[in-house]
Amino acid sequence: MLYKGQWDRAGLDYQALKNQWHVVARADEVSAERPKAVTLLGEELVLWRDGAGQIHAWKDYCGHRGAKLSLGCVKKGEIECPYHGWRFDAGGQCTRVPAHPDQATPSSARLIFRHHAAERYGLIWVSLDAPVRPLPVFPEWEDASFRKVFAGPYRYRGNALRSVENFLDASHFPFVHANLNGNPDAPEPLKDYQVFKDDRGLRTSEISVFQPYGDHRGIPVDARYTYSVFNPTTAYFVKKTGETERFCTFLNATPVDEAECVIWLIVAINFGAELTEEKILYRQDMVFEQDRLIVESQRPARLPLDLQQEMHVRSDRLGIEYRRWIRELGQIAAEGKTTQPEIETALS
Ligand code: FES
Ligand code: CO
């Protein structure tokens, strides 16, 4: 069922996602003065920076009368609620109640719905529960021989896991990206490939894809794709052409709720100095728009993790392993203890 603003928490997909890092914003969207509201897995969150520039992700909620902290501001490294001006420090402790300036704020006036937040690759990452996997690896980020281009964000009225599976699926190119990445009347059969799994996630052997209509430069290429999946919502491919040309994309799909996601993309490229950023973005925007129509059409919206559902062929191997892996992560998380903190905000 499609419904907005929520995610069925009993589902193994939710279980697999609650303790993983997710991109929720670009780092430059959260300034020193202004908090930002985001939604992750149906939870409304506020992002803000303390006096040291450290990022915080809390439930977007003031314990006094329930107003959204994201409508407030940051003063002296503390977040101030827009309703009655209470201030909270980075530890969630209330430091100031303007209606009673002479009364000390008791230690029980503390917000404890705080999540895990980090900043990397120019992006802000949040994990609702303690993250069980490290932040994803983007090897080309520090490599100066690769230009980096941010694409998107692309908003899909579709499920995040469906959108990542779409990104991992090379057999749709001749159809969804017809006359761009393949010919629908003469699709090249996908050669067999392998999927490996270890504690870093999933990765494939090279997958050969002939692109008769050319790459970003318009040159027909015999491309070799290698995919990696670092966590259920972060995936990456290296597309090799020629001896040394590498076109990499690092993709993150934010699971806003069951039926909505936001896709953040960083392209890293070590050739084509003549390609303008506009030219690269033009093609990325077109490809993701074509994918959007498909992902939004998929039913059920949520990715089925039971392999008895939907039909599978050999070329779907990566998608099959992806579903198995998420199911496994979900089962492990569901067996562990979940810690939902209680609210503690009373002011005497
Ligand atoms: Fe936040 Fe009153 S609701 S200060
Ligand atoms: Co596509």
Image: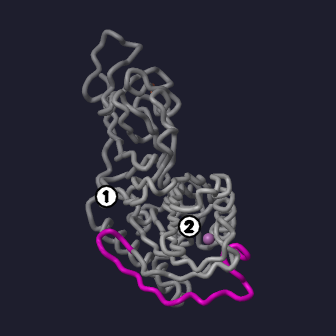
Labelled disc at residue 62: none
Tag count in the figure? 2
- Asked if 116 appears above or below 102 in the picture, the reply is below
SS assignment at label 2: helix
Left or right relative to 159: residue 80? left
Amino acid carrying label 1: it is Pro
Amino acid carrying label 2: it is Ser
Q: Position of residue 64 (x, y in %)?
A: 41, 28
Q: Residue at x 34, y 35 (%)?
A: 111
Left or right relative to 61: residue 341? left
Viewer-proximal residue among 24 and 136: 136
Q: Position of residue 125 (x, y in %)?
A: 41, 49
* Ligand 2 sits in quadrant: bottom right
Viewer-proximal residue among 10 and 235: 235
Camera-near label (1 vs 2) is 1
Q: Which residue is disc 1 drawn over?
A: 134
- Asked if 53 appears above or below 2 in the picture, the reply is above
Q: Residue pushed farthest top?
A: 102
Q: Which residue is disc 2 drawn over?
A: 163
Query: From this viewpoint, is residue 6 visible?
Result: no
Q: Position of residue 7 (x, y in %)?
A: 49, 59
Viewer-proximal residue among 89 and 85: 89
Whether tag 1 and tag 2 are in contact, CB under 8 A, the answer is no
Question: Which segment is the magenta one?
Answer: 177-202
Q: Position of residue 169 (x, y in %)?
A: 55, 77
Q: Quadrant of the C terminus?
A: top left
